[in-house]
Amino acid sequence: MVKARGDTRTLNLLDWEPAPIVEAFAPERVRAVSLRTKVARGVAEALKDCEHSRAVVADRMSEFMGETVSVNMLNAYASEAREDHSMPFIRLLGLIHATDDVRLLQLGAEMFGYSVVEDKYLGWVDVGRLADIKETIDKDFSAARRLAKAGFK
């Protein structure tokens, strides 16, 4: 079926791409010389991409954490120039809750070789882990079989 000129309702199936399993910031958006600056850039990106205003985000964080978070605090956490205002982890969790942006968790996890994935994918992660183990066992089994056929113990 050919899409008629001006048709904005028919989808092109070849343009479809699955959603990423791991949500992460574009590397160029959070590239920085220091960890503090990298986190500040991540905070700024999360706030920029959030559908809520900073005032709403601050209110949602305050309610979630049970302590007051102001817009000025959010601005300081998002500022690369405010070296005296690194975001504490508890507030980072509050920001993730308020913005629903897990890319902030991924920002930290990827520095240690880990990824943040939704729980619904954990079964498939385990399948991959077990496939790695099976591959190792299969190689060891093949090597042992060759040695046994050759008469070695």
Image (cartoon, helix red, strand yellow):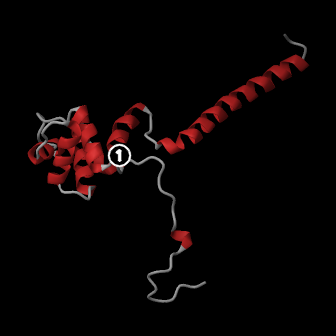
Where 18 falls versus 153 (above or below)? Answer: below
Packing grade of label 1 (10 A; few <14, some 14-19, many >=20) is many
How far across and down, in percent of the image, does residue 130 sit? Answer: 64, 32
- Image-based side of 144 in relation to 46, left or right: right
- Name the residue: 25% across, 32% down: 89
How far across and down, in percent of the image, does residue 95 sit? Answer: 25, 43
- Image-based side of 75 in relation to 46, left or right: left
Residue 30 showing in the rendered view: yes
- Name the residue: 20% across, 42% down: 63
- Name the residue: 44% across, 34% down: 114
Residue 33 showing in the rendered view: no
- Name the residue: 21% across, 47% down: 60
Of residues 78 and 65, which is closer to you in this image?
65
In the image, farthest residue toward the bottom: 5
Question: Quick one: quadrant of the C terminus?
Answer: top right
- Image-based side of 62 in relation to 145, left or right: left
| Three-letter amino acid code of the residue under disc 1 | Arg
- Image-based side of 132 in relation to 6, left or right: right
How far across and down, in percent of the image, does residue 94 sit? Answer: 25, 40
In the image, farthest residue toward the left: 72
Q: Secondary structure at mark 1?
A: helix
* Quarter where residue 43 is shown: top left
How far across and down, in percent of the image, does residue 30 sit? Answer: 29, 46
Question: Quick one: quadrant of the N terminus?
Answer: bottom right
Of residues 69 and 47, which is closer to you in this image?
69
According to the picture, the residue beneath numbered tag 1 turns out to be 103
Where 38 falls versus 139 (above or below)? Answer: below
* Quarter where residue 90 is shown: top left
> How many numbered marks are there?
1
